[in-house]
Image (cartoon, rainbow, N blue to C red):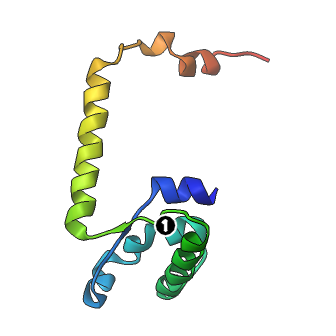
Amino acid sequence: FLRQQLHTSMDLDSCWYNNWFYGGLQWQVVHHIFPRVPRHNLPIVKQQLQTLCEKHGLVYKSVGWWAGNLEIVRVLYETAMKARKATVVSFADSMIWQAMQAEG
């Protein structure tokens, strides 16, 4: 669970005055691992989690605003290019339709 969250999430490094604008969204990794922790405690938990990750050789990804947005655009572009090459299947032939029509 921890490795999956670390691999699929990232935090945004921000200045103290931007924290209000982000509304806690800049601490995605900690929020996904500990969703019930109050927002004002997320920076404390982040430091503790980073220490734990360093101890066990895990990567805790935390990037700046520009780097984070560039990565998002890059991943969206790569996904769009894969989708263009994918074979289109009609909904009636899809596994979702088949599951909806299952009886029993």
What is the tally of numbered marks visible in this picture? 1
Q: Quadrant of the C terminus?
A: top right
Closer to the camera, 102 or 68?
Answer: 68
Q: Is residue 35 visible?
A: no
Residue denoted by label 1: 29
Residue 67 located left or right of residue 60: left
Q: Residue at coordinates 52% horizontally, 71% vertically from top-left?
A: 30
Closer to the camera, 44 or 55?
Answer: 55
Classed neighbour count for the residue bearing mark 1: other residues with Cα under 10 Å, few (<14), some (14–19), many (≥20): many
Eyeballing the image, is 39 above or below 61?
below
Q: Residue furthest right?
A: 104
Eyeballing the image, is 89 above or below 32?
above
Q: Position of residue 16 (x, y in %)?
A: 30, 89
Q: Position of residue 74 (x, y in %)?
A: 24, 45
| Residue type indicated by callout 1 | Val
Q: Residue at coordinates 56% horizontally, 76% vertically from top-left?
A: 49
Residue 82 located left or right of residue 43: left
User: On the image, which quarter does residue 21 sit in?
Assistant: bottom left
Q: Is residue 2 visible?
A: yes
Closer to the camera, 54 or 87?
Answer: 54
Task: Kindly state the secondary structure of the residue where label 1 is placed.
Answer: helix
Q: Position of residue 83 (x, y in %)?
A: 31, 26
User: On the image, which quarter does residue 91 sit in?
Assistant: top left
Closer to the camera, 76 or 22?
Answer: 76
Q: Position of residue 68 (x, y in %)?
A: 27, 61
Q: Quadrant of the N terminus?
A: bottom right
Q: Residue at coordinates 23% horizontally, 48% vertically from top-left?
A: 73
Q: Residue at coordinates 26% horizontally, 70% vertically from top-left?
A: 64
Eyeballing the image, is 8 above or below 16?
above
Eyeballing the image, is 101 above or below 63?
above
